[in-house]
Image: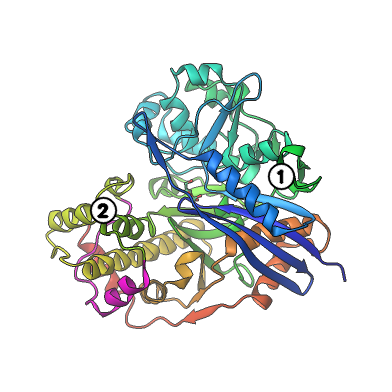
Amino acid sequence: TATARVAAVDLGAASGRVMAARVGPDLLELTEVARFANTAVRAGGTLHWDVLSLYRSILDGLRDAGPVDSIGIDSWAVDYGLLDADGRLLGNPVHYRDSRTDGVIEQVLRQVPAERLYAATGLQLQPFNTLFQLVAARDTAQLAAARTLLLMPDLLAYWLTGEIGAERTNASTTQLLDVNSGTWAAELAVQVGIPPGILPPLREPGQPIGVLNADAGLGPVRVTAVASHDTASAVVGVPARGERFAYLSCGTWSLVGVELDRPVLTGQSRAANFTNEVGVDGTVRYLRNVMGLWLLQECQRVWGEDEVEPLLRAAARSPGFRSVIDPDDPVFLPPGDMPARIAEACRRTGQPVPGTPAETVRCILDSLALAHRAAILDAQRLSGREVDVVHIVGGGARNELLCQLTADACGLPVLAGPVEATALGNILVQARALGVLGAELAELRDLVRNTQPVRSFTPQGDSAAWSAVAARLA
Ligand code: LFR
């Protein structure tokens, strides 16, 4: 049978990688060819992505990947570059954790009531949604000069191929896509002062984008649109059977939810800040953003501690449930002194203040497990979809303590892995487009399940005990 060789570029907020894969009906072999740090740069008072450095690392990685039939790119969501009338990038893309969006949600909601915004877009309110970033930039010379907005993977694909477009799964995170029609919400854009003409034509996962141009120096390889929102690719890579599963894509963020056929747009869903993001094949990623391992990553940065394993071992020995925080409190969103913020949150809620890194890490993991529990309970209640199992994919699947705590808190079995679900999802959509895999999403997941290692965690203790802990934060 036919096999394909494909390359996946997967950019996370902390690091990027280029993976090479061989794929066929019974074959899914993945090799990491390059891994590079993604380091934000503060310049002129603004937090930026270093997009040229990412692009250079991608080109180097693709060169090392050797000959492939296709290349696909995914990254974190919402962030973008603007092109001028000559097709040149206007400035460096701004990081979604930059403070320029402080207060912008409130400003927009005075113009567009929250009910209407949710009915139109189905999206959770996050200060960094593209809509709010653009409103924050409304009166800038840069936006005035802009002719085209390209989300990060689309910008990189543009440099590789010269082709312009907006891949749908990622476009669905902008809060500028109409949840009912699936087209750009041009009227909404106009209402908040965003020129709708900058939003490029949409493209679907699996569609060819174009062919590598001469700049890349790698020959005329085809670039394929994948589910370019990393979380959408991760959900493709979940090794689930059937539909009674919750997923937890766990990295810098914990994205927790279920896969549905249609969006949930009720008032209760809006109040719970659940989002209806677009998945592949017409699916809806009904999920909530939980702050995720960002809390731990920022602590590590402050402590100057590169190694996570010793911290996790110490946290496993540290007593549980001593203090918990609400990880989704906006105070934890920007970069900064995370251990001090966590200490302050414990003090404020009358709980013991973690005194050592081990205690702080334990507090983070207990708190994340608790937030995972709340999100999974809410997802079921709000959507009517019941689940029997929680699939944890992404880097967090390596974190045994977090996997076990999540199983305990949810009272559900956890299946952990693959760690590289996002790259796998990216690869599977390309391989399907090349015609070497079956058409059904379920078949793609079967291939992941049959080829990738998965570990299982059985829930222990009484999960209801976690409700009492949650009550401390009420
Ligand atoms: C995860 C992710 C989330 C999105 C956040 C910001 O990497 O893509 O899905 O909410 O990053 O873009």
User: At which x and y percent is residue 311?
Assistant: 31, 71
Asked if 4 appears above or below 104 in the picture, the reply is: below
Answer whether residue 473 is visible to the viewer in this image.
yes
The verdict on residue 324 being magenta is yes
Q: Specify start and end residues of the magenta stretch as a single range.
A: 307-328
In which quadrant is the C terminus drawn? bottom left
In terms of secondary structure, where does tag 1 sit? Answer: loop
Q: Which numbered disc flags the more N-terminal residue, 1 or 2? A: 1
Q: Which numbered disc, 1 or 2, marks the residue closer to the eye?
A: 2
Residue assigned mark 2: 338
Asked if 174 appears above or below 368 in the picture, the reply is: above
In terms of secondary structure, where does tag 2 sit? Answer: helix
Disc 1 residue lies near ligand 1 with CB under 8 A: no
Residue assigned mark 1: 204
User: At which x and y percent is residue 368?
Assistant: 34, 63
In which quadrant is the N terminus drawn? bottom right
Number of labels in the image equals 2
Type of residue at label 1?
A: Glu
Q: Nearest the camera: 426 or 132?
A: 426
Type of residue at label 2?
A: Met
Left or right: 272 in relation to 213: left
Q: CA distance from mark 1 to mark 2?
A: 39 Å
Left or right: 311 in relation to 195: left
Left or right: 310 in relation to 228: left
User: At which x and y percent is residue 123?
Assistant: 49, 42
Judging from the image, the colouring scheme is rainbow
In terms of image quadrants, where is residue 200? top right
